[in-house]
Amino acid sequence: MTERILIGELGQHVGETVSISGWVDVRRDQGKLVFFDFRDRTGVVQGVVLPGKDEEAEALMTAAKEVRNEFVVTVSGIVNQRPEKNVQADKQNGNIELEIKSIEVLSVAEPIPFDISGDTREIDENVRLNYRYLDLRSERMTKNIRMRSEFVRRCREFLFGNGFAEIETPLLTESTPEGSRDFVVPSRLNPGKFYALPQSPQQYKQLLMTAGFERYFQTARAVRDEDLRADRGFEHTQIDIEMSFVKMEDVMNTVEQMVTKTVEDMGFTIKQKPFPRISYKDAMEKYGADKFDLRTEEEKEQGILAYAWVVNFPFFEKTDDGKWTFTHNPFSMPIPEHLDWLMKGENIEQILTTQYDLVCNGYESGGGSIRAHRPEILEATYKVMGYSEQETKDSVGHMIEAFKYGAPPHGGIALGVERNLMNLTGETYLREVQAFPMTRGGQTAVMNAPKPLAEKQLKELGIKVDPQK
């Protein structure tokens, strides 16, 4: 059996007989000649079946006329140099053509429900997601998902090169105040009790700092039951980073170096380096929001990336019932000059936090802070929010206990993979950079969820469903 050659490597095999495998991208039957475009993960090449008078040639022509778009095939043929007048310089493999000698159909394809040869953006969302595996074959979607993989790979390589350890944290955890509603999972072994899916690895990564790992990261899945919108879904992925013995500048500089190297190595241009830094107060006064787009119209057309840091956020804000709550998360440190206010519970509205958000092209692309690493600081935060000692213990008692055993100063950040890919691709919907996103109504792609559980499953979990709701 001839070894398979990838389509992207065919230019190295001119004059040779090769075997390729992939999909029929296009078939053009011109009577005496049948042309094909074949594709695999590395690219596209044109092939042609030439007329002949012997039985073998006639059988090949008959087989070629039966093949349709999206059939999966193995094709053998001779890689020929195209005559100069037929060279298509603007196309991959535009200077070669495969003279087909045999076609083996590995899998037939029914007519597909929508056209994937062009941009599928205008196709009905539910249809696209129902057949997402077809949608992902389109050139734009393939490019987006592969770019996502490259972005994550390059970030990971940077972090490994700078002394970080990749550590996974649990998916089944405790419901904690991260700022959004939790998705909960019933426990069969503990009827009436529930796990929560992580909104972020926030507490675990702080515990890893307490454990002495000093530099941690993971590409973490995060799940939040919050209202869906163009740039937000129930699920997302974040490059999660935490560092010990650092101040704000250390974390921000490390992340800035990682982002700069990653996107520039991917061929993108950054508007301004170092990234500009603007206070939350100034951002709100100048742009009316804490995420903004610093590009000109010309720079938008050129795909320029305009990064900036937003700093000096208020630590607390008022709730509808007049109580204080955190603006980002309760585990942050105030800026050093406001620590005394926090410990005394004074000037709450003026306390600023060590939060830093990375914005790019109008999107929040990442957010982090220096963390509280002493138990009394975390206790003071919860006291400001009106928690009793027992309520604080019930909520974050495990963190307070851990910090009693020597926790280093630490801080970190989470970069949203989807948000960053939206910046790189120019997409305006998060679903365009996820392989299997949800619909606007929270329905899964391809599979039918959410849906009712079988009565047997409900009994095992000790759950009764109110039919009125």
Image (spheres, rainbow, N blue to C red):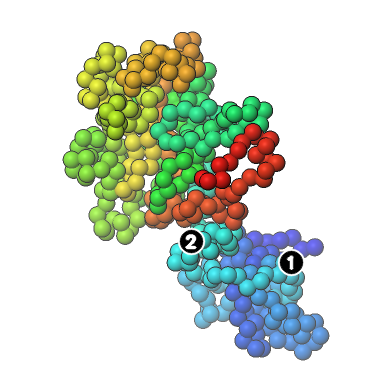
Mark 2 vs mark 1: in front: 2
Name which of mark 2 and mark 1 comes first in the sequence.
1
Helix, strand or loop under label 1: strand
Q: Which mark is residue 106?
A: 1
CA gap between label 2 and label 1 equals: 30 Å
Q: Is residue 384 above or below residue 454?
A: above
Q: Which mark is residue 125?
A: 2
- Residue at 76 percent of width and 63 percent of height: 2
Task: Specify few, some or many for label 2: CA neighbours under 10 Å numbering under 14, 14-19, or 20 or more.
Answer: some
Task: Specify few, some or many for label 1: CA neighbours under 10 Å numbering under 14, 14-19, or 20 or more.
Answer: few
* Amino acid type, mark 2: Glu
Residue placed most toward the observer, 328 or 249: 328
From this viewpoint, is residue 6 visible?
yes
Count of residue discs: 2
* Amino acid type, mark 1: Leu
| Residue ranking furthest to the top | 405
Task: Indicate left or right for 395 with 357 as reference.
Answer: right
Image position, residue 321 (x, y; %): 29, 30
Image position, residue 141 (x, y; %): 51, 59
Image position, residue 230 (x, y; %): 40, 52
Quadrant of residue 46 in the image? bottom right
